[in-house]
């Protein structure tokens, strides 16, 4: 997972944009995803490395990364808020299940 806290001062500060910006990153991810025709290779070659990088950044900054299901719900929070957010999501999914059982 995380390789530890980054050392030194970040170059360029928070306003520096990566080469091409967010649209270029999105297009790059879409192109990479299009290269893989099955879920296993997509997961191995794009999704897992991306999530691993996201986990490392969050851990280095002291954030908690919470990924839930039913579409996609991604929450990056402080460790103090993580358990409250987890409980909210669990309560939501439980209420959804209870509603399905009544139908």
Image (tube, rainbow, N blue to C red):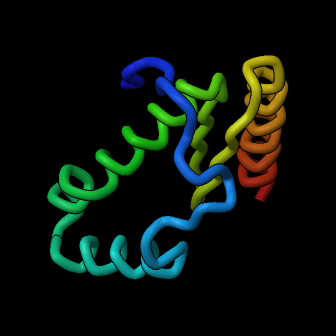
Q: Is residue 80 above or below residue 16?
A: above
| Picture layout, residue 93 above or below residue 102 | above
Closer to the camera in the image, 26 or 71: 26
Q: Quadrant of residue 65?
A: top right
User: Looking at the picture, how far across and down is residue 73, in whole percent?
Assistant: 65, 52
Residue toward you, 18 or 80: 18
From the viewer's perspective, is residue 34 above or below residue 91?
A: below
Q: Is residue 97 left or right of residue 74?
A: right
Residue at the (54%, 73%) spot, across then down: 22
* Quadrant assignment for the C terminus: bottom right
83 sits left or right of 1 in the view: right
Q: Nearer the viewer, residue 60 or 44?
A: 60
Q: How many marks?
A: 0
Residue nearer the viewer, 79 or 15? 15
Residue at 33 percent across and 54 percent down: it is 47
Residue 1 point in image, percent of width and height: 37, 24
Give the residue at x 57% y 49%. 69
Q: In the picture provided, is 64 more to the left or to the right than 34?
A: right
Find residue 88 and report its horizontal and vertical position in percent.
83, 35
> Where residue 13 appears, x then y in whole percent?
64, 50
């Amino acid at each position: 997972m995380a390789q530890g806290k980054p050392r030194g001062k970040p170059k360029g500060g928070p306003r520096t944009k990566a080469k091409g910006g967010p649209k270029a990153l999105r297009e790059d991810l879409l192109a990479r995803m299009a290269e893989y025709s099955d879920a296993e290779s997509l997961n191995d070659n794009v999704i897992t490395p991306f999530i691993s990088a996201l986990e490392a950044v969050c851990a280095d900054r002291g954030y908690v990364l919470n990924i839930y299901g039913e579409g996609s719900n991604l929450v990056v929070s402080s460790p103090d808020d993580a358990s409250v957010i987890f409980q909210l999501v669990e309560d939501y999914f439980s209420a959804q299940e209870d509603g399905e059982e009544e139908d």
